[in-house]
Amino acid sequence: MKIVNVLMFLILVFCSLKTATSKELNIYSHRQPYLLQPFLDAYKNKTNIKLNVVYSSKGLAQRLASEGKNTPADLVLTVDIGRLYIYKDKDLLAKINSKILNDNIPSHLRSKDGTWFGLSKRSRVIGIAKNEFSKGEVSTYEDLANPKFKGKVCSRPGSHVYNRALMASMIANNGYDKALVWAKGLINNLAKRPQGNDRAQIKSIFSGECKIIIINHYYYGKLTYSDNDDHKKWANAVKIIFPNQSKNDRGAHINISGGGVAKHSKRKNEAIKFLEFLVGEEAQKLYANVNYEYPINDKFERPIKLKKLGNFKEDKLYIEDIAKLAPKAQEIIDTVYW
Ligand code: FE
């Protein structure tokens, strides 16, 4: 009897260990931990699965590649299609076929081969100084290169992934030669050397240094609803323009936050379930409420606090094309010293 009891005990211990490990997932993330935490908490509440995050702004793809089959990683989360595509390009992502992912993510915002998936959207928009321009005077990305705006435009350096993606979208839509001419015009219009982050551009309109800026839309939301009164004042000086909205035009350039399942994950099914959770109603609301990002699918409610910005039309370019054009975009950025 005693031996049976011991055996039963050992079997119980073994089973509980097994569930303990399957109750955890490991994420390699380029997203800052404070932005991920609300999602991790919501998932833990729902499923009791603990998500461990290895966060780094750089080097995670190299790490995943060098770990090979021994990697502890189950998922990769990042912002910007350029960064996400690197994982696909290095063959670090599993191919997934999930009806929930396919139904909830528009086809231009997920990989055709099921490796990467967009999870939320951000638009690279134009901000203008309030009361400086007549209605419609600045309405397209192409306008940023109009010589009449000489000395008015400001932006962070061109090599930042956000600007490189915008540059790539200009190449995709207008061709390399026109994109180069546009970039030269943009540089000629700069009020100062490209510097600072997107928040700094908003501040530069408040300070009067700049009249037209290029920013990701959610920074406007973050500053508008900041606890810091100065931030609110900066944002209040700016009017947001979603570019290229006229009837026959392509719409505003968008980028994604996204992710995929690590090719050598030992818990692929659980990892897929987490991605499916991220494109469900609860998580999509979090993207809107936590970071003012737009849901990946317009069937979900957009950030209530950004409602006054109105609806906008997005450029439906297959977003992987932007990642593929990144080297060409960088070539132009280097040529014009953006
Ligand atoms: Fe950002």
Image (spheres, helix red, strand yellow):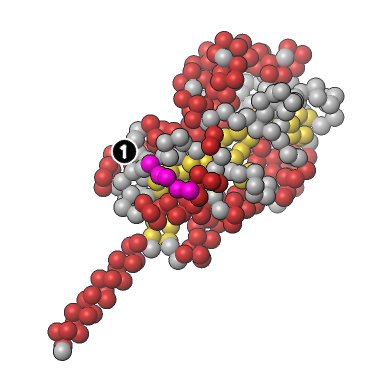
Q: Position of residue 206 (x, y in %)?
A: 76, 34
Q: Nearer the viewer, residue 9 or 218?
A: 9
Q: Is residue 137 above or below residue 60?
A: above
The image quadrant where one finds the C terminus is top right
Q: Main secondary structure of the magenta part?
A: loop
Q: Position of residue 84 (x, y in %)?
A: 45, 36
What's under tag 1, amino acid-wise?
Ala
Q: Position of residue 284 (x, y in %)?
A: 59, 51
Residue drawn at the location 50% of the way across and 34% of the way down: 81
Tell which residue pokes out farthest to the bottom in this image.
1
Q: Position of residue 254 (x, y in %)?
A: 60, 33
- What residue is pinned by disc 1? 65
Q: Residues within 10 Å of mark 1 (few under 14, many from 20)?
A: some
- Residue span colored magenta: 95-99
Occupied quadrant, residue 123 = top right
Residue drawn at the location 72% of the way across and 19% of the way down: 143
Q: Is residue 133 above or below residue 14?
A: above
Whether the magenta-drawn stretch holds residue 97 is answered as yes
Residue drawn at the location 15% of the way across and 89% of the way down: 1
**Image side of residue 192 versus residue 264, left or right:** right
User: Taking the image as drawn, is residue 101 in sight?
Assistant: yes
Whether the magenta-drawn stretch holds residue 43 is answered as no
Q: Nearer the viewer, residue 246 or 89?
A: 246
Residue drawn at the location 42% of the way across and 51% of the way down: 272
Occupied quadrant, residue 8 = bottom left
**Image side of residue 42 versus residue 147, left or right:** left
User: Taking the image as drawn, is residue 336 in sight?
Assistant: no
Q: Secondary structure at mark 1?
A: helix
